[in-house]
Image (spheres, grey):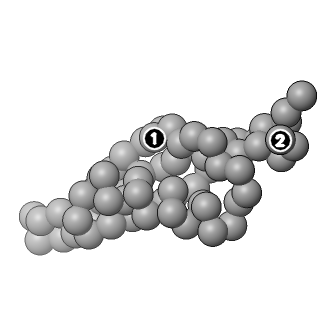
């Protein structure tokens, strides 16, 4: 029987939401073992002078504790 845990992380990118998701998953894999899935919980942008400065995503990362 496997035991899984879910943790929430926030990642950002100056390029796109897709790039922010990839950065978040890449970073999660550096710290967590057995990452199995990621769910995009929320998306937002920061704006300065009428232009998008940063794309942000909130990710729910699922990883297995016992495989």
Instruction: Judge whether residue 3 can be spotted in this image.
Output: yes
Question: Residue 66 location in percent, x, y?
Answer: 87, 43
- Mark 1 and mark 2 lie on one chain; the one further toward the N terminus is 1
As displayed, is residue 2 above or below residue 10? Answer: above
The residue singled out by tag 1 in the image is: 40
Q: Which mark is residue 67?
A: 2
Q: Residue furthest front?
A: 67
Q: Residue at x 73, y 57 (%)?
A: 33
- Callout count: 2
Gap in angstroms between the C-alphas marked 1 and 2: 24 Å
| Disc 1: CA contacts within 10 A as few (<14), some (14-19) or many (>=20) | some
- Residue drawn at x 32%, y 59% as measured from the top left: 19
Residue 55 spot, x, y in % from top left = 30, 59
Dot 2 surroundings within 10 Å: few (below 14), some, or many (20 or more)?
few
Viewer can see residue 46: no
Name the residue: 69% across, 67% down: 31
Quadrant of the snapshot with the C terminus = top right
């Amino acid at each position: 029987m496997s035991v899984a845990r879910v943790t929430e992380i926030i990642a950002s990118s100056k390029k796109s939401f897709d790039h922010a998701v990839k950065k978040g998953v890449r970073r999660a894999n550096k710290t967590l073992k057995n990452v199995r899935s990621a769910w995009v919980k929320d998306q937002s942008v920061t704006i300065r002078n009428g232009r998008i400065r940063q794309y942000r995503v909130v990710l729910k990362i699922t990883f297995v504790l016992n495989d």
